[in-house]
Image (tube, rainbow, N blue to C red):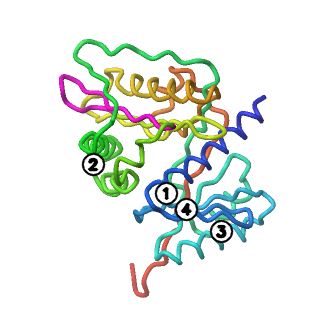
Amino acid sequence: MTDDLVALSDRGYHVFSREITMRQGGIVIEQDGMFHAAGLHDAPFISNETMRLDRTVPAAVAVARAREYAARFGRVAGMSTFGDDGDLDDELAAAGWDKAVVLDGMVLTEPVEESAPEPGIALRTVTTPADLGVMVSVLGESFGPDEPWPSLWASVFTDLSTIDQPDTSAVIAELEGEPAAAAVGYALDPVGVVGMVGTIARFGRRGLGNLVTRHVAAFCQRQTGRPVVLQASPEGAGLYERIGFRPVTRYGIWIDRPPRPAGGG
């Protein structure tokens, strides 16, 4: 059963990356056991990355293809590795790449109940371009006020069409009328995906992240009748475990270390 959940988590990560890249007008290439995504921003992760889908592709070949692909777009290469990509992790480390973060692949198999907002908290669906701008602002500030986050989320959610679809739910939580948290969920095939959750730091510990996550996860369950997956940062894993998600695997986010210019220190 655990192996099945790992496969489901891996598939969810893959189809989510493909979906958000295509919706923003980016480029997706899937061939020869490799997945390459190029979004509209330059950061080497989140809709701008490479994955090895076929484990028979030699690690050295996968790394070379990731670099070749990134060079086509004049970008630093980024690569996501899966839990059984130990050979690829070793190859990336030997090739001088930096492991930026390790994410928990988490799966929710039991029905989730939505929470009723507490007094002073309002939950609203993103339905207008103005709402979308607010959501992008909340995500930008919650993930980090410095670049690349503000422009990254603006490039992922270029216009309302990126979320105004029957298989997508995007919500904002407001505290005393001030936007404080946001989340987006995707009811994809073969699994629902909680794609991004953010709470602005000064509004933390009010249950807002829990509130918006439950809402979009429940949406995915209603739409698909299937489990829901997400990739959790070390800081966010506890929140998702309290909702019912459980970790089944891990993903490494690797960034190529660009060569220093001649004469550099």
As helix, strand or loop, the secondary structure at mark 2 comes to loop
Tag 1 residue: 45
Q: CA distance from mark 1 to mark 2?
A: 17 Å
Looking at the image, do the residues carrying marks 4 and 3 touch, with CB atoms under 8 Å apart?
no
Disc on the earlier residue, 1 or 3? 1
The residue pinned by badge 4 equals 37
Q: Nearer the viewer, mark 4 or mark 3?
A: 4
Q: CA distance from mark 2 to mark 3?
A: 31 Å
Residue at the disc numbered 3: 63
**How far across and how far down the image is residue 130, in percent?**
23, 43
Q: Marks 2 and 4: which is nearer the front?
A: 4
**In this rendering, position of residue 245 left or right of residue 41:** right
Residue in the picture at 63% in, 25% down: 225
Q: Earlier in the sequence, mark 2 or mark 4?
A: 4
Image quadrant containing the N terminus:
top right
Q: Secondary structure at mark 1?
A: loop
In magenta, the rendered stretch is 167-181
Mark pair 1, 4: CA separation? 9 Å
Marked residue nearer the N-terminal end (1 or 4): 4
The answer to whether residue 192 is above or below residue 54 is above
Is 173 colored magenta in this rendering? yes
Q: Secondary structure at mark 4?
A: strand
- Image point 62% across, 42% down: which residue? 12
Q: Is residue 144 magenta?
A: no
Q: Residue at the spot x=42%, y=48% of the render?
A: 162
Amino acid type of the residue that numbered disc 2 sits on in the rendered structure: Pro
134 vs 5, nearest the viewer: 134
Q: Which of the numbered marks, if any, corresponds to residue 55?
A: none
For image coordinates 27% across by 48% down, the residue present is 145
What residue does disc 2 label? 145
In three-dimensional space, the C-alpha distance between marks 1 and 3, rounded to whole angstroms, equals 15 Å
Q: For mark 2, does the 10 Å Cα neighbourhood hold few (<14), some (14 to 19), or many (20 or more) residues? A: some
